Amino acid sequence: MDAVTMEALGKVGAAAAIAFGAMGSAIGTGTAGMAAVGAWKKCYIQDKAAPFLLLIFIGAPLSQTIYGMILMNAIGRAASEGAGLWPAMIAAGVLGGIAMAMSAMWQGRAGAAGADALAETGQGFGNYLMTIGVVETVALFVLVFIQAAIR
């Protein structure tokens, strides 16, 4: 197999990293978004102020798309420098992207629960945000450790 083909195959892993990360972000933001809309509806029905802070819960899973882009760039560089390692680049992109997607999906579910609880009680925003942050840490670990592994 020629070097150009091997490099191209390695860059498939780069594309997979952002694609899977973005899929997870879409699912996570959609999940949190649906819950926030429901929470706002409850507030309107009770003639309470609808908390604008729920947008933070909706947007939190978007960061995994950014992490996927960072991993994409790292894998792309590694594929260009060591084209013969294309199977490792595909594995890094697919597995890293899926792990980031799972983080975003679960972050969206945690955000959904936080949106419901905050709208109902008006309390606990910091606690809910910390929970989302802990779930976010999984994606950060994946990003850092896979980048270290492919260097």
Image: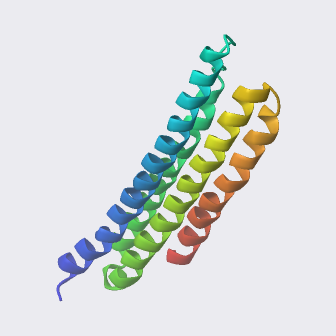
Residue found 53% across the figure and 62% down from its top: 102
Q: Quadrant of the N terminus?
A: bottom left
Left or right, residue 8 beside residue 43: left
Query: Is residue 106 or residue 5 the one in the foreground?
Result: 106
Q: Nearer the viewer, residue 150 or 113?
A: 113
Q: How many marks?
A: 0
The percent coordinates of residue 66 (x first, y second) are 48, 48
> To which quarter of the image does residue 92 belong?
bottom left
Q: Is residue 13 above or below residue 122?
A: below
Q: Image height check: is 81 above or below 45?
A: below
How far from the left and from the top, in percent, is residue 126? 80, 35
The image quarter containing residue 10 is: bottom left
Q: Is residue 44 above or below residue 10?
A: above
Q: Who's the residue at 67% across and 35% down the image?
A: 116
The residue lying furthest to the front in this view is 45
- Residue 93 rendering spot, x and y as whole percentages: 42, 69
Query: Is 26 or 93 nearer to us in this picture?
Result: 26
Q: How is the image coloured?
A: rainbow
Height in image: 78 above or below 23?
below
Image side of residue 39 versus residue 2, left or right: right
Residue drawn at (50%, 75%), measured in percent from left and top?
A: 150
Q: Position of residue 143 (x, y in %)?
A: 56, 62
| Residue at the (61%, 16%) spot, across then down | 45
- Report the side of 86 relative to 97 (left or right): left
